[in-house]
Amino acid sequence: MSAKTYIEPQTTIPVYDECDVLVVGGGAAGHSAAIAAARAGCRNVILMERYGYCGGDVTGGYVLLIPNLSFHEKTYVRGIQEEWYTRLKKVPGGVFGPGPEEAGNYDPLLVNAWNTAGGATFVPPRMVCHGFMLEPNQLKIEMDLMLKEEANSIRVMYHSWGCRPIMDGDTCKGVIFESKEGRKAVLAKVVIDATGDADICRLSGAPTSSAIDDECRCGTTALVYRIGGFSYKAYETWRKQNPELSKSLNENIQKIHGFRQGIFATPDENVAWANNWHVKRDCSKIVDQTYTEMQTRTTLREVVDFYKKAVPEVFRNAYIYDIAPQLGTRGSHRIVGEYIIDSNDWIFPKQHDDVIAWHCTVNTLNDNAPIEIPYRSIVPQKVNNILAPGRHISADRIAIDNVNLIPQCVGTGQAAGVAAAVAVADGATTRTVNIKKVQDILAGEQDVPLPRNSHTDPGYQECLEKYEYGLYTENAKKAIEAADAAGTYRHWTISKGMGTGEN
Ligand SMILES: Cc1cc2nc3c(=O)[nH]c(=O)nc-3n(C[C@H](O)[C@H](O)[C@H](O)COP(=O)(O)OP(=O)(O)OC[C@H]3O[C@@H](n4cnc5c(N)ncnc54)[C@H](O)[C@@H]3O)c2cc1C
């Protein structure tokens, strides 16, 4: 980058609109925040999104897998996340995966059957869990429909890129944005930064961090694509019958692409999801963004040709079905919040008075059990009236790998929306908001089970106790012993957790 600088002249910016709650970014977190704020009674919400649709990584980046919503027989992640499932289930080809009623089954046959569809835990103990693969374009439509259902409360501003917060001391009063109409401002009582890369928080004076461990998924970018014209079941059968050849196929694909790629089932039996990992790339840097896009596309024809040539009995008629319209962004800048999630949140069953969501993790350290996400982890330090749910939540360089998952983003987004609505209604700030009231709305009216809340079926807590989560499970004991032996804290949290990189 050039060392030269240019001083932008001072200018007067027109105010485009004013609202109570402004959500910047319409991904899993931002869309949920806007919907939840409206449902909690806020009649003046604006959702601002730089692209022309909602869903972010999920619909635009083709992240089709919603994993581990349940722990044994109980579905701990519900609310708007469960609503995606129930709405898409009514749409032909909308979802593929076991429903909540199938959760908790240890039958190896069923675990095997759901293995690649998000319907079984990836790591031991292996069991069927409520989870699913979704059709991204159908979710885009459902997300628009959900916004239209709240049209009396939510105004949507697509193609509007939030640039910087309007700060009055440490208090946020709105956001300046760019669009085809030029540079304008939206004033707001509460701003929810759901940009995924802390775009608004970073310029607000709040501390942020971009440290990510090299071995973590969050240090990788992707450009996801789909391959059509073959039977995924036939591929699975071939793969299991030919483990050595399958390994060699993957190695060859990796060599051609120059990065690791894996194909997975989708709701359409004849279409596969090609997820990929460009290591040591930062999704907030122009050079890495450009590299990821171009390197994936320019090697893709050769990759598909290789599949056809190497395994014609499966891939003879394979073709590039489509390429995700936007870059896959796993992690970059995050807020440094009033609480920083770290690996101890998995090892110990931490209880938080300000819990706003259960997040069902994919981690052997706690046998895939749900952890409690506190409100403080979406409250940036130092500033007032900004909340930051989603993949830029406050978590350390390793823990972020476990908490950037979609269910967490939907859950914290939903909670942020309710908290913002309650703060505005009560004339409070994001720091003084009545958290008990927020929890009661979430658990009572918005279908979000919460620990120790009178609106939540006590069976949830009993299920955790029955399976001994929190009493140092066998897997946690082994992991800690391994850590002691290896002498590294870092190693065991990665190698026993999501750092295996399979999503
Ligand atoms: C390839 C890949 C595979 C993954 N695999 C899985 C998986 O299998 N399961 C899982 O649960 N999770 C997975 N993840 C992680 C998960 O998809 C994301 O962490 C999650 O979807 C992030 O949601 P979000 O709403 O926080 O952020 P995003 O989805 O990034 O949404 C941010 C939104 O804000 C918009 N935006 C950004 N900046 C601005 C701005 N300045 N102004 C206006 N709008 C803005 C964006 O366009 C976007 O719509 C994967 C991620 C990737 C990339």
Image (cartoon, rainbow, N blue to C red):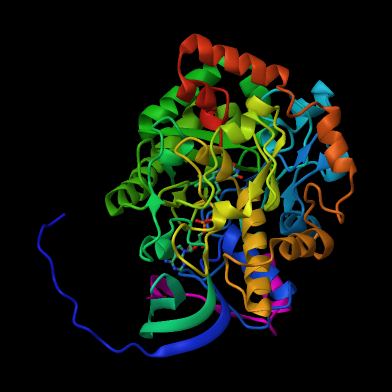
Q: Is residue 255 left or right of residue 492?
A: left
On the rendered structure, is 107 left or right of 411?
right
Which is nearer the eye, 29 or 463?
Answer: 463
The part of the image, by quadrant, that contains residue 89 is bottom right
| Count of picture labels | 0
Pick the residue in front: 238 or 110: 110
Q: Percent from the top left, x then y, of residue 333?
A: 40, 51
Residue at (56, 83) in percent of width and height: 19
Q: Which span of residues is magenta-colored?
A: 140-168
The furthest residue to the front: 432
Which residue is more in the foreground, 34 or 241? 34
Residue 409, given in percent of the width and then of the height, sits at 60, 53
In the rendered image, which quarter is residue 169 located in? bottom left
The residue positioned farthest toward the top in the image shown: 485
- Say if 97 sits above or below 2 in the image: above
Instruction: Please identify the quarter of the rendering in which residue 496 is found.
Output: top right
Is any part of residue 35 visible from this angle?
A: yes
| Screen quadrant of the N terminus | bottom left
Relative image position of residue 24 (x, y in whole percent):
50, 69
The residue lying at 38 percent from left, 41 percent from top is 211
Q: Residue furthest left?
A: 4
Which residue is more in the foreground, 324 or 424?
424
Which residue appears at 29% of the width and 54% of the height?
286
Q: In which quarter of the image is the C terminus?
A: top right
Q: Could one spot residue 242 in this view of the protein?
A: no
As for residue 379 lying within the magenta part, the answer is no
Q: In this view, does 348 lie above or below 167?
A: above
Residue 166 is covered by the magenta coloring? yes
Q: 455 left or right of 471? A: right
Point out residue 280 in the picture as x, y percentages from the top left corner.
35, 37
